[in-house]
Image: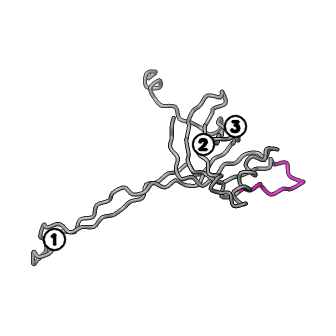
């Protein structure tokens, strides 16, 4: 039983983790720490090819057999949404604002999202390319609330891969 437990891969639970965002070419050592990330999804489109084989079938034996084959198409990455408690840092806002000002081509960045546990050990590393912010928001503000203000940024990426 002990040997089975030792060889079983660790299941990563979200309650003890945080994410670190690093953008290529950034002057900051870290561009942001986040407590929530949504959209880690990449899909491969399906191309369905329909062809008629020379094999004859049917009553008159004059029609070929219809065969459908599915082959892989383009790979598509979902947008990634990062959320954290609002800080005094304006890095995300400035990045979003530069895109709004029409400098979007210069604002496309590659980078990485690293998932750390509370002991600051890397548990997963994702690299992305061609990312730029499509939306920026903060949670509704209420003077009577004791909730933390949440800053959210959505990134469009050309693709991402898991490195570790």
User: Label for residue 111?
Assistant: 2
Q: Secondary structure at mark 2?
A: strand
Q: Nearer the viewer, mark 3 or mark 1?
A: 3
Residue furthest toward the top? Answer: 2
Between the C-alphas of marks 3 and 2, the distance is 11 Å
> What span is in magenta?
136-147
Residue on which disc 3 sits: 30
Q: Position of residue 153 (x, y in %)?
A: 69, 52
Badge 1: how crowded within 10 Å, few (<14), some, or many (20+)?
A: some
Residue at x 76% of width, y 50% of height: 150
Instruction: Establish if 48 lies above or below 35.
Output: below
Q: Nearer the viewer, mark 2 or mark 1?
A: 2
Residue on which disc 1 sits: 64
Badge 2: how crowded within 10 Å, few (<14), some, or many (20+)?
A: many
Q: Secondary structure at mark 1?
A: strand
Label tally: 3
């Amino acid at each position: 039983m002990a040997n089975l437990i030792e060889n079983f891969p660790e299941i990563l639970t979200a309650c003890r983790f945080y994410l670190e965002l690093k953008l290529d070419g950034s002057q900051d050592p870290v561009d942001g720490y986040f407590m929530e990330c949504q959209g880690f999804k990449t899909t491969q489109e399906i191309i369905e090819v329909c062809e008629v084989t020379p094999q004859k079938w049917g009553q008159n034996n004059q029609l070929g057999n219809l065969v459908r084959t599915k082959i892989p198409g383009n790979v598509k990455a979902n947008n990634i949404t990062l959320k954290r408690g609002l800080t005094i840092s304006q890095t995300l806002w400035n990045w979003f604002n530069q895109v709004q000002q029409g400098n979007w081509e210069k604002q496309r960045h590659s980078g990485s999202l690293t998932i750390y546990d509370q002991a600051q050990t890397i548990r997963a590393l994702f690299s992305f390319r061609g990312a730029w912010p499509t939306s920026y928001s903060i949670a509704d503000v209420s003077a009577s609330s004791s909730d933390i203000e949440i800053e959210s940024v959505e990134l469009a990426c050309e693709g991402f891969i898991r490195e570790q």
